[in-house]
Image (spheres, rainbow, N blue to C red):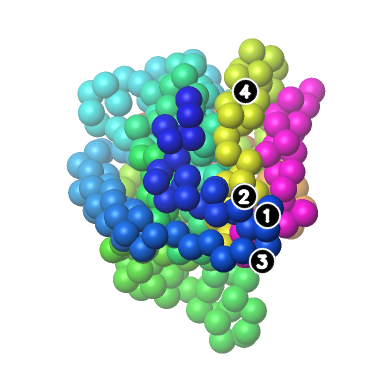
Amino acid sequence: MSKADYLTEFGNALSSMSQGLLENRDKEIKIDKSILEKGYKKNGARLESLHKLLPQRDTVFLLAPGYMSNSSIEIINKLQKQKRAYICGVNFTSFHDKIDLDLLISTHVTVLMAGAVSKTPPKGIIHGVYSAVPPVVSSSCTIMWSDHFLMGKLDKLIKAESAEYIIKVNEEKLKGKSPCILAPRNVMMFASYFLAFAGARKIVFAGFDPKKPEYFFANHDHTKMEIARCLAMSDPFISAWDGRVSRIPPTLETIYRQNDLIKDVLRKSTSSIAGEGWRFEELKRAVNQLKEICLIKDIDLNYLGESIFCNYLKIEPFK
């Protein structure tokens, strides 16, 4: 698949600009305004479409790339076929053989490009970015985001802990051609906060247990090789950019981002790093705030299958 197939017109222009600036840093390269305007218009339309669609589904499943039993997968597929459920997943969940993903969500553009060129591409993509830009990957919607727990000053930190404050801000900002959202720096939380403010009435986690962080493909070499193949097909300049305008042209720290991700996938032991240290503590804080947001907004929050983490935080199992 060529670049034109999995990148938007803006995405291709961004890649060309980054490459051109890397080759000649003194050269001035700009992207045509009409490309930007066209991209932002599509962005707003796709977000509006999701705002209308999500409330029509009884359940929105949010898949993490952890282990799921066959019985859990059967439940998800059955409800999807009955048009009672909408299936979302983060990062590598589009590589599940038995699941037809409606929406792939990530804050890492390389993963989204890999999903777009896979044998089973998602129907839509939500791309969390740090700088306001129109869609970069085909069929995607870009959402600018920041972690409210990193606000710094005491008065802002107090607001960051307030579910009411987060609801007020996100309901005002998650709309239009250049939407943005406050969400903790964890891809499952970015996805959860997005769905909660995009109209989901019931969010159900699946394959989500940071206390058992091994990826679903950890022992499947064929799936690992397929993911690595798709990662290798992604654009290296867009991969190095990864949502930040400050990385155009790419910095030395990010130019090898694509290769590093491929090496991570091909390791013998492949797992998430969210189940320990400060990341785990931040995740607990984020989930507790998400529970409060869901309670205020009358959104059900459940989990499917087994999860030590969800049980520990008193999230109710899906029935």
Q: Residue 19 — which label?
A: 2
Name the amino acid type tagged 1.
Leu
Q: CA distance from mark 2 to mark 1?
A: 5 Å
Q: CA distance from mark 3 to mark 4?
A: 35 Å
Q: Which residue is mark 4?
A: 229
The quadrant of the image that shows the C terminus is top left
Marked residue nearer the N-terminal end (2 or 4): 2
In contact (CB < 8 Å): disc 2 and disc 1: yes
Marked residue nearer the N-terminal end (3 or 4): 3
The residue tagged with tag 3: helix, strand or loop?
A: loop
The stretch in magenta equals 246-269
Residue at point 35%, 32% (across, down): 123
Which of pointers 2 and 4 indicates the residue nearer the eye?
Answer: 2
Q: CA distance from mark 2 to mark 4?
A: 22 Å
Position of residue 310 relative to residue 97, above or below, is below
Q: CA distance from mark 1 to mark 4?
A: 26 Å
The residue tagged with tag 1: helix, strand or loop?
A: helix
Q: Which residue is mark 1?
A: 22
User: Relative to 28, is 219 on the left or the right?
Assistant: right
In contact (CB < 8 Å): disc 2 and disc 3: no
Name the amino acid type tagged 3.
Asp
Q: Which residue is mark 3?
A: 26
Circle 3 packing at 10 Å, graded few (<14), some (14-19), many (20+), is few
Residue furthest top as drawn: 222
The residue tagged with tag 4: helix, strand or loop?
A: helix
Which of pointers 3 and 4 indicates the residue nearer the eye?
Answer: 3
Image coords of residue 260 (percent x, y): 74, 38
Position of residue 250 relative to residue 168, above or below, is above
Name the amino acid type tagged 4.
Arg
Which of pointers 1 and 4 indicates the residue nearer the eye?
Answer: 1
The residue tagged with tag 2: helix, strand or loop?
A: helix
Residue at point 79%, 23% (across, down): 268
